[in-house]
Image (cartoon, rainbow, N blue to C red):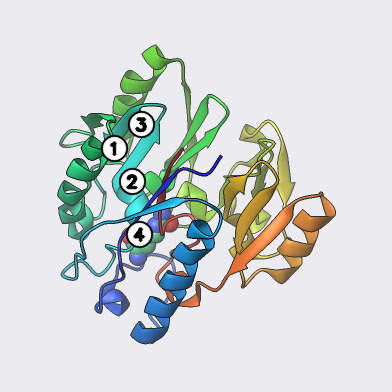
Amino acid sequence: MPGTLLVRPPSPRLAEGELTHLDRVPVDADLSRRQWQEYRTTFAARGWQVHELPAADAHPDGVFVEDTVVVFDDLAVLTRPGAASRRGEVASMRPVVEGLGLEVAAIEEHATLEGGDVLKVGRTVYVGRSSRTDDAGVDQLRTLLEPRGWRVVPVPVTRVLHLKSAVTALPDGTVIGHEPLVDAPELFDRFVPVPEPEGNAVVVLDDRTVLLSASAPRTADLLRDRGLDVVTAPVTEFEKLEGCVTCLSVRVR
Ligand code: CIR
């Protein structure tokens, strides 16, 4: 099930990115670039087609492309980030998703929505009501998706930046998260706690393989005990900016 992976190289100004819950610490720009290269190679080695967006070096958070578009079947929804500093990242995503032959819609002013708040599990779309995504953003997404057979479920997010900073889904639809960071685990049909905060985020590479941060070795063991293959990638420089393995790419399957 490999598909197309959309990525954007990290800005040399990554260290100036937005911070909401973490304190600012030094970021190694060279290491961030090496980690990003390794991240994309992890996908390319498994048959993913990597599509690199043009650099947007004026945008410190531009590497976190996941926040700028969400894809549902053949529909790409361009977002309107809640962080004003990030709104300029969206325009360069439009020609990319058009070029992939996707139908394109957009979240309209004054609503806000960021891709990190959107978690798909089967035909259910959980949307984080966070500091970046507001009720109007959830409503616009629902209007776009419900006629297409998706169920939209708002979820409170107060303890981390985005919904997917708290929870993600395994290939079988089980939602995982580090419980102290999850506002309402009972909203998910099946929820399994993981021992590390960096263990909440997985990217499904195929039916039996997930990508996980190298900062979460105990979660890797837990997932392997569940019968999954676990591939790890070091993403420390992005974690310092409240990023994780999901937000460094958009997966178009
Ligand atoms: C921000 O605050 O917008 C960036 N520093 C981090 C964005 C991470 N995105 C994501 O988890 N989807």
Q: Nearest the camera: 126 or 171?
A: 171
Q: Is 203 left, or right, of 158 in this rendering?
A: right
Alpha carbon distance from label 4 to label 3: 20 Å
Query: Residue at image x 48%, y 65%?
Result: 41
**Numbered disc 3: secondary structure:** helix
Disc 4 target residue: 64
Disc assigned to residue 138: 3
- Circle nearer the N terminus (2, 1): 1
Q: Is residue 108 above or below residue 83?
A: above
Mark 4 sits near ligand 1, with its Cβ under 8 Å away: yes
Q: Nearest the camera: 69 or 15?
A: 69
* Type of amino acid under label 1: Leu
Disc 2 target residue: 114
Quarter of the picture holding the N terminus: top right
Disc 1 target residue: 100
Are the residues at dot 2 and dot 3 in contact (C-beta closer than 8 Å)? no
Disc assigned to residue 141: none
- Of circles 2 and 1, the one toward us is 1
Query: Horizontal and vertical percent for residue 141?
Result: 33, 28
